[in-house]
């Protein structure tokens, strides 16, 4: 029987005669994304738990709407569908801004400690994936769940999780629940990273009777996080320039992906956009062509990520997610225990077993299980209580802001190669 469909331009939707399916076009999808962000903002600010652990507003709003859509579908048979035309560009814009924010000159400020910290951070990427894949094999589940509950989401966060989830949903993986699992794991990691970071640093400081070094007062500071009073105005001219740089990163990244597709160096498009942004930032800076406006780039990237996450999360398939609740829960609990042991006996010891290394542990827990903002929040809590560690405020943003994403891309690619060989 032919289906009767009503076109309602004022609602920017196509609605079947029995209201069983509502298809939102570009404008309707965009409006819905903004409503999700608005609701997420209000709820996050009103609920102390969400506000205290810095749960992203699109995560809060997206989960609320995902459950609303689930209830409408389960009890009333109403299905909402959204256009995907806007999703991929938003993701690519976000990763282009990550690349454009990666200033390699800042690495010099970290000195020897940065390299020791990097060894620890990069080592955890391998451990998280090995644990994840191993547990899923033991439970008889898809090993890709292990990667999604490994470094992809725990060290990569919601953005990396959603990006790889989208990749795994397509050929040659065909894992349709990938994005839903990624969002769930990233959300858990964000909370866990905020919960364990401060207490771990507190435990180490008390156990070893560590004291903040008074010489810290003479060290180089990270003004962005310690003294963010200096503000450069965002203007239309600077904004357009930033958009041009992002557009170049998008165009080049997409082109490289098309050229390298089905080759040994093939990677998802967002990785190439990230690398292109890094090349532009450091080449232009070194040649004196243009100095990237970090705060402006950050604003654009955060807007793109918020919109992307609002759509990715509000369209979660909760039914499929519930079916995998037990193995995912087991995996995440074990991953939490693993990082606690790892930062205690690897990060802390490798970085010097002193006060600064204890602060680095707080930061590592933050972005090793959640995201860089969580790491910074952990640092601020610890240093406000026990004393300043300027070197930690330099190393954690550098490592969590972009170096871990670069290393993570290669780590994930390596495990995927093993996946096809052995699984």
Image (spheres, helix red, strand yellow):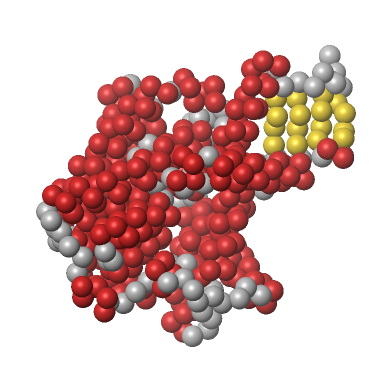
Q: Residue 3, percent across and down?
A: 84, 20
Query: Is 100 displayed left or right of 12 in the figure?
Result: left
On screen, 104 above or below 326? below
Q: Residue at x 77, y 45 (%)?
A: 27
Q: Residue at x 87, y 35 (%)?
A: 8
Which residue occupies the foreground of this view, 204 or 174? Answer: 204
Q: Residue at x 40, y 60 (%)?
A: 402
Query: Is 138 displayed left or right of 311 in the figure?
Result: left
Q: Residue at x 21, y 75 (%)?
A: 215
Which residue occupies the foreground of this view, 269 or 264? Answer: 269
Query: Is 157 displayed left or right of 237 in the figure?
Result: left
Which residue occupies the foreground of this view, 206 or 292? Answer: 206
Q: Residue 30, percent across and down?
A: 71, 46
Q: How many marks?
A: 0
| Occupied quadrant, residue 351 | bottom left
Quarter in which the C terminus is drawn:
top left
On screen, 286 above or below 87? below
Q: Residue 20, percent across and down?
A: 76, 20
Quarter in which the N terminus is drawn:
top right
On screen, 349 above or below 393? above
Name the residue at the bottom extreme: 288
Which residue occupies the foreground of this view, 181 or 3? Answer: 181
Q: Is residue 152 visible?
A: no
């Amino acid at each position: 029987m032919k289906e009767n469909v009503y076109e309602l331009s004022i609602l920017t939707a196509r609605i079947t005669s029995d209201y069983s399916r509502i298809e939102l076009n570009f404008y309707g999808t965009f409006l819905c994304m903004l409503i999700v962000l608005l609701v997420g903002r209000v709820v996050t600010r009103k609920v102390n738990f969400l506000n205290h652990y810095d749960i992203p507003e699109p995560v809060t709003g997206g989960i609320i709407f995902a459950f609303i859509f689930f209830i409408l579908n389960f009890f009333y048979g109403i299905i909402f569908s959204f256009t995907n035309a806007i999703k991929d560009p938003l993701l690519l814009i976000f990763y282009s801004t990550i690349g454009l924010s990666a200033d390699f000159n800042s690495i010099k400020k970290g000195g020897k400690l940065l390299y020791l910290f990097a060894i620890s951070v990069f080592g955890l990427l391998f451990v998280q994936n090995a644990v994840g894949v191993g547990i899923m094999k033991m439970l008889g589940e898809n090993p890709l769940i292990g990667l999604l509950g490994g470094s992809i989401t725990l060290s990569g966060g919601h953005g990396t999780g959603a990006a790889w989830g989208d990749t795994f949903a397509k050929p040659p993986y065909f894992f349709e629940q990938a994005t839903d699992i990624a969002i769930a794991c990233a959300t858990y990691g964000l909370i866990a990273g905020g919960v364990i970071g401060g207490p771990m640093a507190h435990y180490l400081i008390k156990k070893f009777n560590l004291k903040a070094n008074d010489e810290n007062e003479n060290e180089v500071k990270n003004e962005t996080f310690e003294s963010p009073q200096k503000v450069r105005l965002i203007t239309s001219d600077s904004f357009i320039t930033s958009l041009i740089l992002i557009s170049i990163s998008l165009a080049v990244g997409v082109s490289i992906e098309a050229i390298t597709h089905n080759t040994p160096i093939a990677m998802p498009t967002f990785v190439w956009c990230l690398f292109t942004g890094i090349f532009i930032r450091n080449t232009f800076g070194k040649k004196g062509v243009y100095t990237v406006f970090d705060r402006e780039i950050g604003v654009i990237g955060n807007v793109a990520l918020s919109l992307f996450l609002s759509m990715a999360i509000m369209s979660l398939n909760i039914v499929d997610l519930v079916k995998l609740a037990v193995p995912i829960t087991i995996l995440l609990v074990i991953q939490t225990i693993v990082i606690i042991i790892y930062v205690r006996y690897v990060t802390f010891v490798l970085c010097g077993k002193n006060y600064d290394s204890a602060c680095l542990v707080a930061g590592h827990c933050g972005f090793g299980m959640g995201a860089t903002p969580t790491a910074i929040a952990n640092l601020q809590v610890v240093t406000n209580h026990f004393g300043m560690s300027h070197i930690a405020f330099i190393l954690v943003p550098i490592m969590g802001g972009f170096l871990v994403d670069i290393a993570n891309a290669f780590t994930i690619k390596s495990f995927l190669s093993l996946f096809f060989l052995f699984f």
